[in-house]
Image (spheres, rainbow, N blue to C red):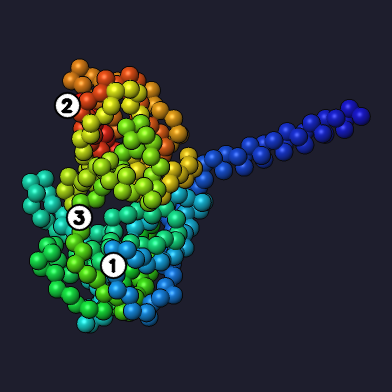
Amino acid sequence: MKNKLLLGALLICIASIFTSCKDDRDDNPTFKTPTAFTLNTPAMADQYIQLSATNTVHLTWSQPDYGYNAYATYSIQVGVVQDDGSVKWCQKDVKDDDGNVIGQEDDYLSTNLYTCSSDISGEEIAQGINQADGITKPEDYVDKGFRQIAFRVRAALFEALTDLVPGSEIVSNAVFFNHMAAYEAIKAPAYIYLIGSPNGWTTPSTGNAEALEEWKLMETEIGSKVFEATFDIPAGDLQFRFYTYLDDWGSDDDPLGSIGPQKADAPIDGCEWDDNNTYSDDLLQPGKGTWKFAGFAGGSVTFTVDMNTNKVKFAVN
């Protein structure tokens, strides 16, 4: 009987070791560099599509194999097929510290995506086509009719918002819409939304886009990824986060467009104005965390969000 008890205890111990190892693997998944992922051929590839500010184009793709169920960020790139069959992909200028153009790099549509299926804004696609054509001002626009337009997707993993995980970036195959027409849509500065106590925690949904128009932080320069706005804030507890797009609240595990100072849906500690009535940190990341300033006296506040450095600065004017 004693031997049976010892054997039983040993088996329980071994089982617990294997369970612990499994838990460790689940909590610390092994990353591997993906080698390919597929953008699916669109069902409407041969249809005539006139882009507009109100229509969308549906795209789906597979998730790259990172070795675990990774939370990837996807970006859409648009290109124009040339007479020789090559693709002129949408690109943007690269500047040095003095603002001089020193080259070009691939550019993507403004909206980042976090699932493998999306209805892409017709306006954003038209902006990308015009950018690939070198059109930067409305007066330069020339209607070129229906053309063959290419799409591909970049996938990447990021720590916080902007720290690229080495080896995680990969670009899909290209797919083609054979008859697609742009219109006079010129890329404008991007924007994000402040959501919180100042606007009564209005739900960040597309149905509330008009109501949230006045709570946009605009990009200081196209492509800068630095957003700024000044709002008149009423007295009371000031609590808020930001949203990069409107698609409901999201969750801790899937924050959708929500960005804040931490992943969990709770305010962080230590939000106090300094002697110059400013506050800053470098905690910005995808998540539903909030900044909270208890007993704010009310007044004009300038909000600055830098997605290049994950830094924010709030200044009472």
Q: Where is mark 3, residue-wise?
A: 188
Which corner quadrant holds the N terminus?
A: top right
Which residue type carries mark 2? Answer: Asn
Residue ranking furthest to the right? 1
Q: Real-space Cα distance between discs 2 and 3?
A: 27 Å
Q: Is residue 132 or residue 33 the one in the foreground?
A: 132
Residue 120, how many percent across, how many down? 36, 62
Q: Real-space Cα distance between discs 1 and 2?
A: 40 Å
Q: Real-space Cα distance between discs 1 and 3?
A: 16 Å
Q: Is residue 96 or residue 235 the one in the foreground?
A: 235
- Give me the residue at 13% from left, 52% from top: 95
Residue 253 appears in view: yes
171 in relation to 11, above or below = below
119 in relation to 313, above or below = below
**Left or right placement of residue 37 versus residue 297 in this view:** right
- Give me the residue at 28% from left, 27% from top: 234
Q: Which quarter of the picture shows residue 90? A: bottom left
Q: Where is mark 2, residue-wise?
A: 317
Q: Which mark is residue 52?
A: 1
Which residue type carries mark 3? Answer: Ala
Residue 142, how many percent across, how many down? 14, 73
Q: Earlier in the sequence, mark 1 or mark 3?
A: 1
Residue 262 appears in view: no
Q: Is residue 77 or residue 58 the one in the foreground?
A: 58
Considering the numbered disc 2 on the image, is that residue within a helix, a strand or a loop? loop
